[in-house]
Structure formats: C-alpha cells, structure tokens
Image (spheres, rainbow, N blue to C red):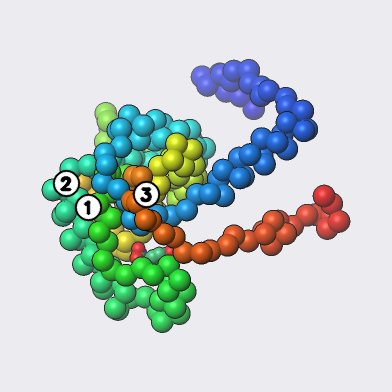
C-alpha cells in the first residue's frame, strides 16, 4: 500500500551470479572475522572525517518507522575525556564490587577487564552513541514516540563497527552501567539516553586480545525443513 503524500520510487539491486555471491560472502567473512574488541589504543589522532564517514554508514541502518532514533557524538576533547573517565571508573568500580554477580565476574574473567579504563583517555576519540526515545515537534512542543529504538541503534552500531573495521580502525563497545552521566557531561537533550561508549583508534603496538573462538555456523543456524541446505 502506498499513500499519496508519500509516493514510492522504483528500486532494484544488481543480480550477481551465484558464484560471485559466494566469493563476496567468503571474502567479507574472512575480513570481518578479523574484527576484535580492542582495549589498548595508540593515541595517534584519527582523521575525524573518516569517523564521520563511518557514522554516515551507521546512519543507513533500518529503524522503526524510519525515525532514525540515534545521535553519535565524537569526543576528542582531552579535558572532557578525563571527566568521562572519572565518572566511568566510579560507576565501574561499584559495578565490579557491588552490582555484578559472582557468575558474571566469572564469565568476564577471560577478558581480564576491571574498573580501570585508561582507554577512555588513551584512544584518540570516543564515539558516544545516544538512543532518542522520543522527538519533540518544534512548533507544538508535542512529544512523538520513536519505535524499536534499541533494535535500531543496535543495527546502526553493527554497521558502524563494520565500517571502522573496513579501514583498520579498532573499537570497543563499552557499556558502563548506569551511564546517564554521559548525557549530562555531553549536555545532551532530554530525549536522549546513552546507548554505548565506543573508544576508537589504531590498536597500540603490542596489543593483545583474548584467544576466543566464535560459534560454528551449525551452532547458530537452523534450517526449516531440517535437512535443507
Ligand atoms: N562494563 C564493564 C563490565 C563488562 C561487562 C560485559 I557483559 C563485558 O562483555 C565486558 C565488560 C566493563 O566495561 O568493564
């Protein structure tokens, strides 16, 4: 169904050969499977226009009713990052000592994380992502809801991470909790809630990552009917 005030326009995609599809997928998988969360960054500045381009890619994500309920803040200001680090470490200390269960701490132990977060100051930039829970009509001041905001922002961040990885920029999806202080420190509007803090940069020399493996295809994919392939 189309409506008169929102006309639809023609759309098509290139039709690849099956062999080309397989090859492209294999190449993309080989490349994306090299993506890792990194916690040690070189302080070298990254060109901001490259980060903006990655954010533009993130903004192509689908979203509930096309509301595009996301805002991305690029934070390079060292003084601001120092303040964010203090607030982050205060919350993380409480999380590690009071909020997280023994089971949670045990699950995290292979990652060797703790409440100390030097990457907030060492990485050349933070991309702080906010989810916009509603929009305010400029004229009437009325509030309009956004839809599937978590899902929409999650997809956008997935695209952001893939875009950064494409050009060799490492990232960490950091989730201090609670993280309301990010909205306060960055002076964000009332309709925004911090979603993720993403330090980005080149990995520091000597960076190591935990030796993790990913689930096999048959562990994450089920066919219906069962025998189909
Ligand atoms: N936010 C904390 C704890 C943490 C939680 C999960 I789940 C992780 O995958 C990693 C860390 C921190 O950043 O240390």
> How far separated are the C-alphas under marks 2 and 3?
19 Å
Tell me whether the residue at label 3 lies in contact with that at label 1, contact meaning CB atoms closer than 8 angstroms.
no
Residue 78, numbered circle? 2
Residue 30: x %, y % from top left = 61, 45
Q: Answer few, some or many: residues within 10 Å of disc 3's Cα (few below 14, many 20 plus, some between 14 and 19).
A: many
Q: Answer few, some or many: residues within 10 Å of disc 2's Cα (few below 14, many 20 plus, some between 14 and 19).
A: some
Q: Which residue is mark 1?
A: 121
For the point 73% across and 27% down, the residue is: 16
> How far separated are the C-alphas under marks 2 and 1?
7 Å
Tell me whether the residue at label 2 lies in contact with that at label 3, contact meaning CB atoms closer than 8 angstroms.
no
Q: Secondary structure at mark 3?
A: loop
Describe residue 14's horizontal placement relative to residue 39 as left or right: right
Snapshot quadrant of residue 98: bottom left
Residue closest to the eye, 62 or 211: 211
Residue 198: x %, y % from top left = 35, 49
Q: Which label's residue is closer to the chain start, 3 or 1? A: 1
Snapshot quadrant of residue 90: bottom left
Residue 76: x %, y % from top left = 22, 42
Q: Secondary structure at mark 2?
A: helix
Please state the quadrant of the image where ligand 1 appears. Answer: bottom left
**Mark closer to the observer (2, 3):** 3
Q: Which residue is mark 3?
A: 203
| Location of the N terminus (image quadrant) | top right
Q: Secondary structure at mark 1?
A: helix
Q: Is residue 221 above or below residue 30?
A: below
Residue 186: x %, y % from top left = 20, 46
Q: Answer few, some or many: residues within 10 Å of disc 1's Cα (few below 14, many 20 plus, some between 14 and 19).
A: many
For the point 27% across and 42% down, the residue is: 44
Q: Is residue 213 above or below residue 106?
A: above
Tell me whether the residue at label 2 lies in contact with that at label 1, contact meaning CB atoms closer than 8 angstroms.
yes
**Mark 2 CB near ligand 1 (8 Å cut):** no
């Amino acid at each position: 169904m189309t409506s008169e005030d929102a006309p639809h326009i023609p759309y098509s995609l290139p039709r690849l050969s099956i062999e080309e599809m397989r090859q492209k997928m294999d190449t993309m998988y080989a490349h994306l499977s090299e993506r890792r969360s990194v916690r040690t960054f070189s302080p070298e500045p990254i060109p901001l226009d490259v980060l903006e381009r990655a954010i533009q890619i993130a903004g192509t994500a689908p979203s509930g009713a096309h509301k595009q309920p996301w805002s991305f803040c690029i934070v390079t200001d060292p003084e601001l990052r120092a303040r964010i680090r203090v607030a982050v470490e205060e919350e993380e200390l409480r999380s590690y000592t009071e909020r997280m269960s023994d089971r949670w701490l045990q699950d995290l132990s292979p990652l060797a994380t703790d409440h100390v977060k030097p990457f907030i100051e060492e990485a050349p930039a933070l991309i702080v992502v906010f989810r916009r829970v509603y929009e305010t009509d400029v004229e009437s001041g009325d509030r309009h809801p956004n839809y599937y905001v978590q899902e929409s922002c999650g997809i956008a961040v997935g695209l952001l991470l893939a875009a950064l990885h494409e050009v060799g920029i490492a990232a960490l999806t950091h989730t201090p909790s609670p993280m309301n202080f990010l909205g306060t420190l960055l002076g964000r509007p009332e309709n925004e809630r911090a979603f993720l803090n993403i330090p980005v940069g080149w990995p520091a020399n000597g960076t190591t990552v935990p030796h993790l493996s990913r689930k096999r295809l048959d562990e994450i994919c089920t066919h219906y009917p069962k025998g189909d392939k």
